[in-house]
Structures are given as C-alpha cells and as structure tokens.
C-alpha cells in the first residue's frame, strides 16, 4: 500500500502526537528523493527498530552551492512513493519549499570542526545547509531515531555532532553503504552516468580498497594514497577532488594508521561528482 503523503508540518505533528500518545517509537529517514536500494535499506532498519516510520522527501536548496547541480538533481516523487509502498512506511513527508523556509526565514545552523575540509572545502556552505534542514526535520517530525547512510560519512559526523552539541532528543543510527555488485556505492547521482562512465565508475572503490589494504599492511599513507589517485585518474576519472585518510571520529587528518580511520574520496566522472569512503582499521 502506497503510504500517505503529507505536505504540512501541522498535519505531520498531529499524526505523530497520536502515535506518541499510543506509546510508539518513531523513526525518520531523511532523504532528498530519487530513492534507491540504499535508501530502502535505511527504511528497513527504521522499520526493524521503530514502531512508526516517516520518510521525508525534500530537495534542500541550502545544501547546494552550485545552482546547476540543484537544477539537475533528479526528482521522482511518484516513483519514490511506489518504491516505498511495500516497505511498511507509515507516512511520507514531502513539504513545499515555503513550508520549510517560509518568508523571512533567517536562521542558519553551523557545525564547525567535522564540517571542515573534504566535502566542506569543495562545497562552501553545504554542511550549514545540511545542519539547518536536519535540525528543522528533527523538530518537525519529533522522531526518536533518525537513520543515515554511512556513504556520506562526513555528513553523518556533522549530524552526530549537531545532536550531541544541542542535546537534541534523538538517536542517530548510521547504516552501512549499499553497493552494486561491482563495488560502486549506490547514489541518486549514478542515474546521471552514461554507459561509458558507468563502466569506469567502480574504479574509485577498487583503488580505495587497494590503498586501504596497503595502509593496513604497513605502506606509508602518502605513498598508498598517491598510487590510488593515479589509478583513479588512469581509469578515466576527470579529476580527484580529495582522497584522504581521516580518523573515523572527529575526522582528524592522519599520516599514519594509529586509530580507527576512514579513507574518504570525491572524484569527478564526466559531469557527475561521486563520493565514497571505507573503514580502515589498524591490524
């Protein structure tokens, strides 16, 4: 059964109030739509851990620093609703722009530290937009638990820092990245890859996995990353925006593997920007 779609905060809050009055635990999966199996894995985790599940669909303009990228972002609400129909979602919240950012809106939520560098360097203001809309969605849904994919590892750390710093009464659950059989991390942006670029795309993850294995085996971090960068470009990527080893928590740059880490990358293939990350653990 296709879940009902609500557009107004007042309607959503009334529904959630009824759920809470009945003692239900409420989970939310925030999305920008263009759903794929990665999103559905979050929905299933929410369904397993909560009594009621909200999926939000809102393409947030404040997290796009490039207007052309916002314009090209895929939108498919009808298709998204159809994908969610068999997943036991209780309601879709798909507000209009002016419901989220009404006239006169003038507040910005900014998280320093974990938002700096990586995607924060190449996309100025991006994480301010993420932190602002996530804060609003948490307040709108009044959910007990929110589910985010680990593919956007830096985003996940920003959200966790936000919740901890502001004492927000919500638990953040990170869920493992879902990949195609060839290793490519699922992303709504993958829809924009032509056949030739799609064939090249898995090279990013292959190079990262090889570098991670070498680092764990003792190869100097700088050498392993340089070899991986060369492999990514040789495979056909136009450029590598970043390829860095960072601490898993706090995202401090690492020159050696002395604590649990993440290898994170962003690279450009044609007109599409792809990101990925993998865990790197000391042996």
Image (tube, grey):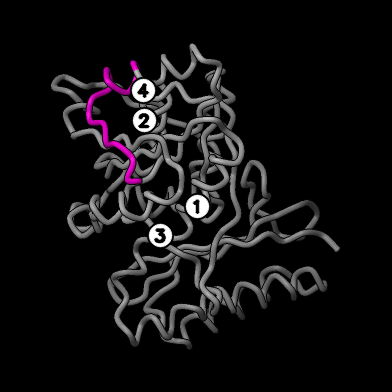
Question: Closer to the camera: disc 1 or disc 3?
Answer: 3
Question: Closer to the camera: disc 1 or disc 4?
Answer: 4
Residue 30 appears at what percent x and percent y? 41, 40
Residue 53 appears at what percent x and percent y? 46, 35
Give the residue number, with chain letter if any, for mark 4: 140
Local secondary structure at mark 1:
loop
Tell me the quarter of the image containing the C terminus.
bottom right
**Chain part drawn in magenta:** 1-14
Name the N-terminal-most of marks 3 and 4: 3
Q: Quadrant of residue 105?
A: top left
Local secondary structure at mark 4:
helix
Between the C-alphas of marks 2 and 3, the distance is: 24 Å
Between the C-alphas of marks 1 and 4, the distance is: 23 Å
Between the C-alphas of marks 3 and 4, the distance is: 24 Å
Residue at the location (36% across, 55% down)?
A: 83
Question: Closer to the camera: disc 4 or disc 2?
Answer: 4
Question: Closer to the camera: disc 2 or disc 3?
Answer: 3
Give the residue number, with chain letter if any, for mark 1: 152
Residue 132 is tagged as: 2
Name the N-terminal-most of marks 2 and 3: 3
Name the N-terminal-most of marks 1 and 3: 3
Local secondary structure at mark 3:
loop
Give the residue number, with chain letter if any, for mark 3: 36
């Amino acid at each position: 059964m296709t879940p009902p779609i609500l557009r107004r905060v007042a309607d959503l809050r009334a529904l959630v109030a009824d759920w809470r009055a009945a003692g239900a635990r409420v989970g939310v999966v925030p999305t920008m739509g263009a759903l794929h199996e990665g999103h559905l894995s979050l929905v299933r985790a929410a369904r397993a851990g909560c009594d009621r599940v909200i999926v939000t669909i809102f393409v947030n303009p404040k997290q796009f620093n490039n207007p052309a990228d916002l314009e090209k972002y895929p939108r498919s609400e009808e298709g998204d609703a159809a994908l969610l129909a068999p997943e036991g979602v209780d309601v879709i919240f798909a507000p209009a722009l002016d419901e989220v950012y009404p006239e006169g809106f003038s507040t910005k939520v900014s998280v320093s530290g974990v938002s700096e560098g990586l995607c924060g360097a190449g996309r100025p203001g991006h994480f301010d937009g993420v932190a602002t809309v996530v804060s609003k969605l948490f307040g709108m849904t009044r959910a007990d638990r929110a589910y985010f994919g680990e593919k956007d590892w830096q985003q996940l750390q920003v959200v966790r820092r936000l919740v901890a710093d502001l004492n927000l009464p919500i638990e953040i659950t990170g869920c493992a990245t879902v990949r195609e059989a060839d290793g490519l991390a699922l992303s709504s942006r993958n829809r924009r890859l032509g056949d030739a670029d799609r064939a090249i795309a898995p090279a990013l993850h292959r190079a990262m996995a090889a570098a991670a294995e070498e680092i764990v085996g003792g190869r100097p971090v700088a050498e392993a990353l340089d070899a991986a960068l060369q492999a990514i470009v040789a495979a056909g990527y136009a450029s590598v925006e970043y390829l860095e080893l960072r601490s898993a928590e706090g995202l401090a740059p690492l020159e050696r593997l002395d604590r649990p880490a993440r290898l994170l990358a962003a690279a450009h293939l044609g007109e599409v920007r792809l990101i990925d990350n993998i865990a790197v653990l000391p042996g």
